[in-house]
Amino acid sequence: MELLGQFNYWVFIVLMMTGFYVVIARGNLVKKIVGLNIFQASVFLFYISMGKIFGGTAPILIEGADDTVIYSNPLPHVLILTAIVVGVATTAVGLSLVVRINEAYGTVEEDEIQQLDEET
Amino acid sequence: MSVAAHLPALQVALPLIAAPLCSLLRRPGVAWGFATLVSWVVLVIAALLLAQVLSEGTLIYEMGGWAAPWGIIYEVDTINAFMLLIVAAIGAIVTPYARHTVTAEVPAEQHNLFYAAWLLCLTGLLGIAITGDAFNVFVFLEISSLSSYVLIAASNDRRALTAAYQYLVLGTIGATFYLIGVGLIYMMTGTLNISDMAERLPDVANTRPIRAAAGFITVGIALKFALFPLHLWLPNAYTYAPSAVSAFLAATATKVSIYVLLRFEFVVFGVDIGIANFHFSEFLMPLCVLAFLAGSTVAIFQNDVKRLLAYSSVAQIGYMVLGVSFYSLDGMTAGIVHLFNHAMIKSALFMVMGCIMLRVGSVQIKDLHGIGRHMPWTMFAFVLGGLSLIGVPLTVGFISKWYLILGALEEGGYGFAIAAAVLISSLLSVIYIWRVVEVAYFKPSPHGAAEITEAPLGMLIPTWLLIGANIYFGVQTDLTVGVARQAAALLLGIDL
């Protein structure tokens, strides 16, 4: 029960490690960016999970409601909106670098680029 | 309200607003002039802030009038005022210098965008230093990082693209680790304000999320400031970036990240909390020693002078963090003063390389034969900068090493071994600086080298300004060591 109750956090860790593995293990520059994206997305889930509590409702004041109403914390959600924007910007810069690498080297495979660099 | 009251906000807002305006200035010279003007105003603001902090103590600026811990506040104390001055001063010197090298290395139609990214990078670095909010640090970290990826890739060498890509991947991993760490702290304390965190943390200090947060933040930030063995992105990035970008980033980007480390290890995770005997120095100190021994050794075998200087940077980062990891007033003073000193040394040396790149078109050691006769002023600047890097008396390098060795000796026991390692590393730096000086002065110039002329004044003046600062602050240490000591005392919670 304890383990299942923290289901969200397990998903976060699995996604994080999956993304991290893809970044390290793949030689294709586009795939690396995708891995980086999964890695960042896992953190979004982490922040979203921590703002939510069982039985918590949207953080909008309800008129006439008693004190027993529980609200979810909106702040992590707002924070993660910013982090999503940062993530999108990073992906955009990363992919545009890949486009330019492809123009300059004619390939997006890491080992082939390394070979081309060694030849010159 | 007078303008003076809004200086902390202006410090960041000015370059931030100037950046998009700069991208509209299509004429290369105009974009450069505008960026230079902004960088000078930024320096004036930073100097005023430091003066204000030194006379009145910590400044708190509430963004939009929202009080902490709900609003974002800018908290300027001795440490960040000093960091702001370092970043702003390097910005104000390197921006005017950039004109000739950027004209030579970046296509003219991209100059407006280049200087816009330049100002954004400056914004990010200043923002990291000034803000008092942990999440805000992340945002500024990404502003500075994203713009520095663009700046590095602006070079005409295609290897710069892969270097920028590599930096992007590792930099993003570092920043995301930091984000996870901040998230974990927020979970446990419910605040993002750094001083507020420090107050609330003792209650939950001995919990697993906080320990995990300390790990994530330390490793993430260490990736950003390229602590050995997380330095893999640094040599390529500094080698292939446009010369002006190398000079600017080498002096500022890693320093600001070290400042973030200081903030977290000493203010948030606190000296006296010592989370379950978790002292980051225990595992950072050996890495620092490895960093400067390995960095200096690898630097000796480099044939590209920019790459040589980059590996030397890896070594110097080792010195800075080593000083900090002693947890003593002298050690900490050494670490902080070296942030400032190394910024001046490395920036000056990279600027010299920019001059050589402009005139010779290469910074390979084999292409520098006899260059000392064709570019006497440039090479003499390299000699003085090199002496400062080695740590010869009357230069700033000596001041840093002096305090570092004092700090090491205070530790007793293993401190002697560390002091010896510092000396060995300094001797190694004599070798790599000498390799360059030897070919430049004592080898005959190759045929066709006669046309090589001295670098333009627009580049020599900023370079010599920094070299002059190297000597000036090597003799007159009141400002640098005095401020660094105050900052160290503040971090360690000691009253001077």
Image (cartoon, helix red, strand yellow):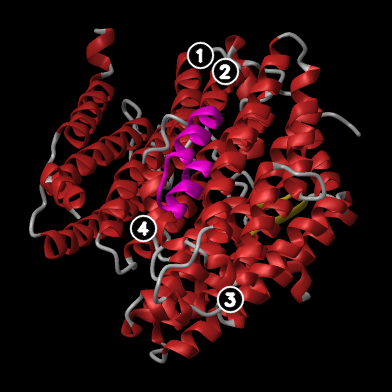
Looking at the rendered structure, the kind of residue marked 4 is Tyr
Q: Mark 4 lies on which chain?
A: B
Q: Residues within 10 Å of mark 4 (few under 14, many from 20)?
A: many
Query: What residue is pinned by disc 4?
Result: B240
Query: What residue is pinned by disc 2?
Result: B204
Mark sitting earlier along the chain (4/3): 4
Q: Classify the position of the N terminus of chain B by image quarter.
A: bottom right
Question: Relative to residue B495, is residue B337 depicted above or below?
Answer: below
- What is the span of residues highlighted in magenta in the rendered image? B291-313
Q: Are marks 4 and 3 in contact (CB under 8 Å)?
A: no
Tell which tag, 4 or 2, sits nearer the viewer: 4
Q: Disc 4 on helix, strand or loop?
A: helix
Query: What residue is pinned by disc 3?
Result: B459
Q: Residue B207, which numbered label?
A: 1
Q: Mark 3 lies on which chain?
A: B
- Disc 1 and disc 3 on one polypeptide chain: yes
Looking at the rendered structure, the kind of residue marked 1 is Thr
Looking at the rendered structure, the kind of residue marked 2 is Val
